[in-house]
Image: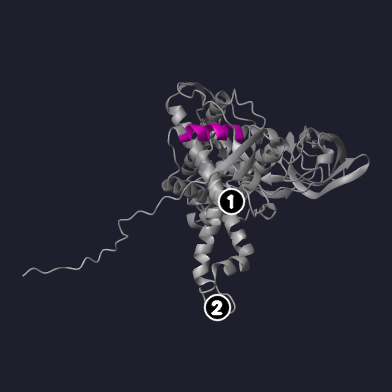
């Protein structure tokens, strides 16, 4: 006897959902600039009616109308009662689906969300639905030749003398600061009150700021050359004045490019006393067993910073060659919005390479003083490197994020979990992704380039940076730069909060 078994497989299991028909749209795209598009869209009435019908088809079987059981009210009554609600719902769905379809069909690559006012878009009673929006896009360009570049790579041999000199800079973080009786000399610390004056009126004041006496004093919106010469030989109670030009891209628009008077009043003078390399001190800063072991770690830090300078110099050459024809004009509003991303990217890159907060501050002041030019340069580089990444199918993998987060965590002496949480909270994972992609593309270009080694010419340590705007627009905080009091290399001397 044969036994008949029941087929329990759902009949719809093998059925494929019918593909949703594409919207019939008329699209007009205007190009105000290389990175801006003004898009006008018209959606056919046939599609508007189809979406309305689908919405009411879903609503009628469950609509609750007074005098009728749920789902039993006549369709025309439901349509009249819920017309406005369904119209808003359908409008939102049409907008979402049309933008999604445009993203698939259009050739431009968006770098921002569409800018339109939902409330001003009308659902017509008859005829097509119209709306328009502005959007920022990646400029259109031919991919430049990137294979076989001729590049220079800076190299340097670190002698024992250079290592000891760098060690002194590291030990300066642990130095005690002592009062000094006598005239100011280079390398001393002057506690000063700064007053910025324009047309006889004070526009800002920084009270009792302690600043190391170096040749250049950098502000967020200006740079004072010859700062050391102004102060050398002076004593507490002395006051000097000089002229400073505010950056053409300062936050305070009224004072951009203006010359102001900077008054410097000296309140106190101090000098730095370096700690002795006793066994207890060596143990405290990193568990070093001997001075030689500490010097070995300092040498590693120098070599890592050299690697950063090599990568930066190679990147500058590569992007310089790639952007020769990138003469697109980028809107100033877009550049200002993108400036904070450039700050974030640069801070993370510097942190990963073991630079101290004071060095990071100096870099960031330099960027702020030329914010539009530096951001325009970085954006052009990013657009081209991103195109190469797409062409070569280069992606940021989960392991890449883990390595970057662990590296930043090492510098900050924090857990990777806490660093990742901070980056996610501040919305910086996309910035991290861009950094990973760009580095991978640069590495690919390097792998097919020809190199000539040249001597490394390090920038002299002549700048002291203050996170302050003379023009009175306020300070600009580093984007989470201070994960710790200073950024140290893995295994290099850690820098506790106390300076004793």
388 with respect to 15 (left or right): right
Q: Secondary structure at mark 2?
A: loop
Q: Main secondary structure of the magenta part?
A: helix
**How many numbered markers are drawn?**
2
Q: Position of residue 477 (x, y in %)?
A: 69, 49
Residue named by callout 2 = 68
Quarter-of-image position of residue 258 = top right
Q: Secondary structure at mark 1?
A: helix
- Is the Cβ of the residue at disc 1 closer than 8 Å to that at disc 2? no
Q: Position of residue 13 (x, y in %)?
A: 31, 59
Packing grade of label 2 (10 A; few <14, some 14-19, many >=20) is: few
Seen from the viewer's position, the closer of residues 429 and 60 is 60
107 with respect to 462 (left or right): left
Magenta residues, as a range?
379-390
Tag of residue 13: none
Residue drawn at 32 percent across, 60 percent down: 12
Seen from the viewer's position, the closer of residues 195 and 315 is 315
> The N terminus is located in which quarter?
bottom left
170 with respect to 399 (left or right): right
Residue named by callout 1 = 95
Q: Position of residue 135 (x, y in %)?
A: 63, 42
- Residue 139 shows in the view: yes
Point out the tag, 1 or 2, that comes first from the N-terminus. Answer: 2
Seen from the viewer's position, the closer of residues 8 and 173 is 8
Residue drawn at 70 percent across, 53 percent down: 120
Seen from the viewer's position, the closer of residues 65 and 16 is 65
Residue drawn at 56 percent across, 54 percent down: 49
Whether 380 is among the magenta residues is: yes
Whether 22 is among the magenta residues is: no
Residue 437 position (above or below residue 71) = above
Spatial CA span between label 1 and label 2: 34 Å
């Amino acid at each position: 006897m044969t036994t008949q078994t029941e087929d329990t497989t759902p009949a719809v299991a093998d059925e494929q959902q019918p593909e949703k028909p594409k919207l019939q749209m008329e699209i007009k795209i205007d190009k105000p600039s290389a990175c801006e598009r003004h898009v006008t869209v018209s959606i056919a009435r046939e599609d508007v009616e189809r979406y309305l019908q689908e919405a009411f088809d879903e609503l009628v079987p469950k609509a609750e109308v007074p005098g009728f059981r749920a789902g039993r009210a006549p369709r025309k009554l439901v349509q009249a009662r819920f017309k406005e609600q369904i119209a808003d719902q359908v409008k939102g769905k049409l907008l979402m689906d049309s933008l999604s379809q445009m993203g698939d069909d259009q050739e431009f690559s968006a770098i921002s969300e569409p800018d339109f006012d939902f409330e001003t878009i009308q659902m017509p009673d008859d005829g097509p639905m119209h709306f328009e929006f502005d959007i920022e896009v990646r400029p259109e360009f031919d991919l430049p030749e990137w294979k076989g570049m001729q590049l220079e790579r800076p190299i340097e041999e670190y002698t024992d003398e250079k290592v000891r000199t760098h060690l002194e800079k590291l030990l300066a973080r642990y130095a005690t600061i002592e009062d000094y009786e006598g005239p100011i000399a280079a390398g001393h610390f002057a506690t000063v009150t700064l007053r910025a004056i324009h047309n006889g009126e004070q526009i800002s004041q920084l009270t009792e700021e302690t600043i190391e006496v170096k040749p250049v004093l950098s502000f967020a919106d200006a740079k004072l050359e010859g700062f050391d010469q102004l102060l050398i030989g002076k004593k507490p109670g002395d006051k000097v004045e000089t002229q400073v030009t505010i950056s053409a891209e300062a936050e305070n628009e009224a004072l951009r490019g203006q010359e102001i008077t900077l008054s410097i009043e000296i309140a106190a003078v101090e000098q730095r006393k370096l700690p002795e390399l006793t066994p207890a001190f060596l143990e405290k800063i990193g568990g070093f067993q001997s001075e030689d072991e500490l010097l070995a770690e300092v040498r590693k830090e120098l070599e890592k910073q050299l690697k950063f300078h090599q990568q930066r110099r190679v990147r500058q050459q590569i992007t310089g060659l790639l952007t020769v024809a990138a003469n697109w004009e980028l809107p100033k509003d877009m550049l200002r919005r993108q400036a904070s991303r450039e700050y974030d990217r640069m801070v993370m890159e510097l942190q990963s390479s073991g630079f101290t907060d004071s060095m990071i501050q100096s870099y960031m002041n330099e960027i702020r003083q030329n914010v539009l030019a530096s951001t325009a340069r970085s954006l052009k580089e990013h657009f081209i490197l991103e195109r190469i990444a797409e062409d070569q199918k280069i992606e940021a993998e989960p392991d890449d994020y883990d390595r970057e987060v662990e590296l930043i965590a090492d510098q900050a002496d924090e857990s990777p979990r806490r660093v990742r949480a901070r980056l996610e909270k501040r919305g910086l994972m996309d910035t991290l992704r861009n950094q990973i992609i760009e580095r991978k593309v640069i590495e690919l270009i390097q792998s097919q380039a020809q190199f000539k080694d040249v001597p490394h010419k390090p920038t002299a340590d002549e700048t002291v940076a203050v996170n302050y705007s003379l023009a009175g627009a306020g300070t600009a905080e580093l984007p989470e730069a201070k994960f710790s009091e200073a950024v140290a290399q893995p295994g290099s001397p850690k820098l506790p909060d106390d300076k004793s």
